[in-house]
Amino acid sequence: MHNVRVESFEELERTGWERIVDDYYAACRPVTHRLIAPLLDAAHVVPGSRVLDVGTGPGDVAAEAAERGAQVVGLDLARAMINLAVRLHPNIEFIIADAVSPPFGDASFDAVVGNFTFHHVSDQPRALASWRRLLCEGGCLALTAWDDPARCRMLGLFQDAVAAARVQPAELPPGAPLMSASDAAYRQMLDVAGFHRSSVSTIGFTVQPLSVDALWTSVLAATVRTAAAITRESEDAQRRIRAAFDELVTEYLTVDGLVVPVSVKLITGRAG
Ligand SMILES: C[S@@+](CC[C@H](N)C(=O)[O-])C[C@H]1O[C@@H](n2cnc3c(N)ncnc32)[C@H](O)[C@@H]1O
């Protein structure tokens, strides 16, 4: 139907992130930066902590950990992301590697953190088992992930617009869900991987895009799967999705402009 070869999930993610580095960094900082301090607090990052930042992207989480006095390594699959991270934070160690199988020995770290990385790895159980292996006894895992689309409207609006437009879904490879896992499901995944005292909390805030068009354009430019679900549609289907989006977004137009809810899960676990 849309004449798009359906690649593997890993290929979609890697090639997608390679392509959108600058747009991602420009558009997503207002969201990603809100989570850096809670993530590092949850992972108990203190001076001297050995920290691995998985899916480091532009490296700002790693940089904040280093500011706290941690010894940090940032890891990402996308070379272009690592190039940006090195440019922004030349004194931090960054490596190109798969977060599912990081090239480090057992018990090498006191903390493993991942800001919006978990829903991009192809094999979540394997990734969790790897991160558990990397942690020393008592070490901490802290991850952030998008909440349910009904609460995280910044992305939920796009999913709802696709559904409301009643278009045939674009062909995307199956993979980890982008949103929607329940707190119990996250806790169970961590328990199965050998973590203890797993917990899930919710952090909510709002963003204020300059306009409806700015929200639409920036999310399509700065995301991989959300964008692919729309840009892989026919032109007519894309027009219908945009019309549905324009209708749905009116709910968030206020006297102060567009105010859109964001909701994020903070998932933590202890090794031992
Ligand atoms: C949403 S971005 C988050 C970046 C960064 N943590 C932040 O807070 O801005 C997701 C990142 O995960 C990376 N990524 C996706 N799959 C990966 C994998 N299997 N291994 C390592 N990094 C991966 C992407 O290249 C991208 O940089």
Image (spheres, grey):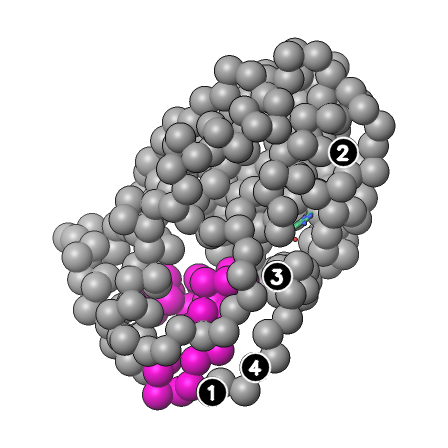
Indicate the amino acid at tag 2. Answer: Val
Do labels 4 and 3 touch, CB within 8 Å?
A: no
Furthest residue in direction front, as rendered: 192
| Among the two numbered marks 4 and 2 on one chain, the one whose residue lies closer to the N terminus | 4
Label at residue 4? 4
228 left or right, relative to 100: left
Label 3 amino acid? Phe
Q: Are marks 1 and 4 in contact (CB under 8 Å)?
A: no
| The residue at label 3 has a CB less than 8 Å from ligand 1 | no
Per the model, the C-alpha gap separating discs 3 and 2 is 25 Å
Query: Is residue 166 shown left or right of residue 185?
Result: left
Work out how far the residue at label 4 is from the one at label 2, CA to CA, in angstroms: 37 Å
Q: Residue at x 29, y 80 (%)?
A: 240
**Relative to residue 262, is residue 220 depicted above or below?**
below
The magenta segment is: 211-238
Q: Which mark is residue 1?
A: 1
Q: Which residue is mark 2?
A: 73
